[in-house]
Image: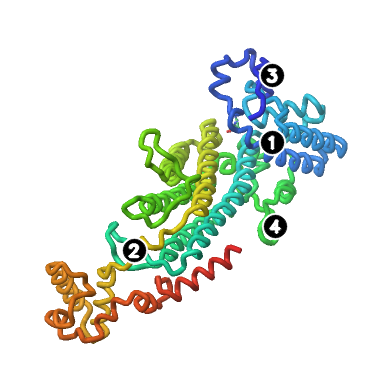
C-alpha cells in the first residue's frame, strides 16, 4: 500500500450534517482504506464512465468532463507509482479519490451526482472480480499445462491406483495426473459461469432507490463492458437488490474454495508420493525445505502449505455466507467486511496455483519405484475375474473364485501370478492354460478400451487432447 496520513480533515460524507468529527477510535474502527485501496483502478474506471455519462445527459459540460477524466487519470498514475497519499480519515478508496480530485479540479464536486458509495462499491467489486477471474483462469490453465507436461514426460509409467489408500488396480501415472486436469477444467467452467453473474452493471441504483436525474445506465454499462455476447448492456434490474447483493462474491468464494479443495487433494497425493514409503516422485531441492534439526530431511512444504491454506479459503466462504445471513435490505455497513475475505480467497488460491505449477515443473517421476509397485500381481485380481467372465462364468461367481485363489496364494506365500494351472483349476474348471496371460501388464492396459478408462490408447489420446486444448 502507498503512503497514508492522519490529518484531521472531516470526510466529505460528514460535511454539513455533523457538528463533530468521529473519534480516532471510531475512525480506525470504520476505515476500509487499509484494504479497499486495492480497488483504485476500478474505482477510477467507474468514475470516468460515470462522468462521461453525466456529460452525455448534460449535467457536466464537455470541458468539466474532460477535466475530471484528466484529473482521475493523473491520480491513477500517482497511485500506480506509489506517490498517492491515502488518508484514513477519508474512510475508503471512493472518498479518498473523490476528495483528492475535487481538491485539484473544481468540477470534481459534480462527479458524485446521481451516485452513492453503495452502487459505487458494488460496481468496483464487480469490475475487480471480472479481472480477477480472468487472471485466475490463466493460472489454472498454467497448472493444467504443468500436469499435462509432467504426464507427457512419463506416458508409459504405471502405478497402483488406490481406493481406501489400499492398492486397487494399475493405472498410468499420466491418468492419475489427468484426473486433476479434469477437475481444474470444471473449476474454470465454474468461474466462467460465475463471471456471467458478475458482469452486470449496478451503477445508477444510487444509495437504494436510483435517482431523479435522467441517468443513462445503458451508456455506463456499455462504456465499462457490461455487455452480453451481442453487445447489449447488462444492467441490474432492482436498485435495492443491486446495492445489497453480494451473491456474486459468495459464488466466487465458493468456486475458489473448491479450487482450494482440489489443490489440497493434489497436495496430499504429492506428499504421499514424495515420502520414502512411496518414492514415486522426487521434488527438486529448490521446491522443498529442510529441517532445522534433522539433517536428512527434505520436506514437501509447498504441498503442505497448499493443503493447509485451503482451510482459510473454505473459512472465507463460510464468513461471507454468515455475513449475508439475515441482513435486512438494503446496504448495511456489514458489507464492508466482504472485501478482506474476497481478497484473501483470490490471493491465496492464486499463489497456491502458481506454486503448485512451478513445483510440478521441478518434479521427476521415480520410474523404477513406480514399476516395482505396479508389478504387484494382486492389482490384476479384477482382470482375473473378468477373464472368468470371458469364459462364461457369472461375475459374482468369478469374484468368489478369484477370492479363493487369492486366499490360496496368500496361504502358500506365493505371488498370485505364480499360482500353478493345477492350483487354479482346483478352484474352478473355468481356468485354462491361457490364465497366466492375464498377468501381462502391457496386455492388461491395452484391454482397457472404454472412454475414460486408464487404457494405453485412451490415456495417450486424452494426453493429446489436453496438450492441444491448452495450447
Ligand atoms: N467502504 C464501504 C464498503 O466497503 C463503501 C460503501 C459505504 N457506504 C455507506 N453508506 N457508508 O462497503
Identified at 54% across, 41% down, the residue is 347
Within-10-Å neighbours for mark 3: few <14, some 14–19, many 20+: few
Dot 3 or dot 1: first in sequence order is 3
Along the viewing direction, whichever of 128 and 448 lies nearer the viewer:
448
Within-10-Å neighbours for mark 1: few <14, some 14–19, many 20+: some
- Foreground label between 2 and 3: 2
Dot 1 or dot 2: first in sequence order is 1
Identified at 77% across, 43% down, the residue is 53
- Could you tell me if the residues under marks 3 and 1 are in contact, i.e. CB atoms within 8 Å? no
- Foreground label between 3 and 4: 4
Dot 2 or dot 3: first in sequence order is 3
Dot 2 or dot 4: first in sequence order is 2
Describe the colour scheme in one phrase. Answer: rainbow
Marker disc for residue 232: 4
- Say which quadrant the N terminus sits in: top right
Residue ID for mark 3: 16
Q: Secondary structure at mark 3?
A: loop
Expressed as whole percent of the image width and height from the top left, the position of residue 94 reads: 67, 32
Expressed as whole percent of the image width and height from the top left, the position of residue 461 reads: 50, 73
Residue 273 in sight in this render: yes
Residue ID for mark 2: 161
Residue ID for mark 1: 115
- In which quadrant of this rendering is ligand 1 seen? top right
- Is the CB atom of the residue marked by disc 2 within 8 angstroms of ligand 1's nearest atom? no
Residue 189 in sight in this render: no
Q: Is residue 8 left or right of residue 364?
A: right
Identified at 43% across, 62% down, the residue is 179
Amino acid at each position: 500500500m502507498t503512503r497514508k496520513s492522519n490529518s484531521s480533515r472531516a470526510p466529505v460524507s460528514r460535511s454539513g450534517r455533523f457538528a463533530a468529527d468521529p473519534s480516532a477510535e471510531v475512525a480506525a474502527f470504520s476505515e476500509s482504506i487499509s484494504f479497499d485501496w486495492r480497488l483504485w483502478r476500478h474505482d477510477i474506471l467507474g468514475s470516468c464512465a460515470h462522468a462521461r455519462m453525466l456529460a452525455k445527459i448534460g449535467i457536466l459540460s464537455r470541458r468539466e468532463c474532460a477535466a475530471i477524466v484528466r484529473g482521475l487519470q493523473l491520480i491513477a498514475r500517482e497511485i500506480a507509482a506509489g506517490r498517492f497519499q491515502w488518508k484514513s480519515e477519508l474512510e475508503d478508496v471512493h472518498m479518498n479519490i473523490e476528495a483528492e480530485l475535487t481538491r485539484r479540479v473544481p468540477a470534481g464536486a459534480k462527479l458524485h451526482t446521481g451516485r452513492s458509495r453503495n452502487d459505487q462499491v458494488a460496481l468496483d467489486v464487480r469490475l475487480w472480480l471480472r479481472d480477477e477471474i480472468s487472471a485466475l483462469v490463466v493460472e489454472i490453465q498454467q497448472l493444467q499445462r504443468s500436469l499435462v507436461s509432467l504426464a507427457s514426460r512419463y506416458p508409459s509409467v504405471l502405478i497402483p491406483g488406490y481406493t481406501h489408500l489400499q492398492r486397487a488396480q494399475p493405472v498410468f501415472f499420466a491418468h492419475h495426473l489427468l484426473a486433476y486436469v479434469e477437475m481444474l477444467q470444471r473449476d474454470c467452467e465454474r468461474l466462467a459461469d460465475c463471471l456471467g453473474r458478475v458482469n452486470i452493471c449496478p451503477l445508477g441504483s444510487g444509495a437504494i432507490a436510483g435517482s431523479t436525474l435522467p441517468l443513462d445506465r445503458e451508456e455506463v454499462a456499455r462504456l465499462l463492458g457490461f455487455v452480453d455476447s451481442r453487445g447489449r448492456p447488462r444492467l441490474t434490474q432492482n436498485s435495492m437488490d443491486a446495492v445489497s447483493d453480494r451473491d456474486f462474491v459468495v459464488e466466487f468464494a465458493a468456486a475458489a474454495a473448491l479450487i482450494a479443495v482440489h489443490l489440497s487433494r493434489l497436495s496430499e497425493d504429492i506428499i504421499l508420493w514424495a515420502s520414502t514409503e512411496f518414492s514415486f516422485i522426487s521434488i527438486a531441492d529448490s521446491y522443498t525445505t529442510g529441517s532445522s534439526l534433522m539433517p536428512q530431511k527434505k520436506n514437501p512444504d509447498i504441498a503442505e502449505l497448499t493443503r493447509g491454506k485451503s482451510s482459510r479459503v473454505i473459512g472465507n466462504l463460510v464468513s461471507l455466507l454468515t455475513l449475508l445471513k439475515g441482513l435486512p435490505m438494503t446496504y448495511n455497513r456489514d458489507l464492508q467486511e466482504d472485501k478482506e475475505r474476497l481478497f484473501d480467497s483470490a490471493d491465496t488460491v492464486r499463489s497456491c496455483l502458481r506454486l503448485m505449477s512451478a513445483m510440478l515443473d521441478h518434479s521427476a517421476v521415480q520410474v523404477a519405484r513406480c514399476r516395482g509397485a505396479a508389478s504387484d500381481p494382486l492389482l490384476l485380481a479384477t482382470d482375473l475375474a473378468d477373464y472368468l467372465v470371458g469364459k462364461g462364468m457369472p461375475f459374482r461367481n468369478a469374484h468368489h473364485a478369484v477370492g479363493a485363489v487369492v486366499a490360496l496364494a496368500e496361504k502358500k506365500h506365493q505371488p498370485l501370478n505364480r499360482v500353478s494351472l493345477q492350483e487354479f483349476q482346483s478352484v474352478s474348471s473355468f481356468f485354462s492354460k491361457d490364465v497366466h496371460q492375464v498377468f501381462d501388464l502391457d496386455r492388461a492396459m491395452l484391454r482397457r478400451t472404454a472412454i475414460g478408462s486408464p487404457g494405453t490408447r485412451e490415456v495417450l489420446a486424452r494426453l493429446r487432447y489436453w496438450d492441444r486444448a491448452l495450447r
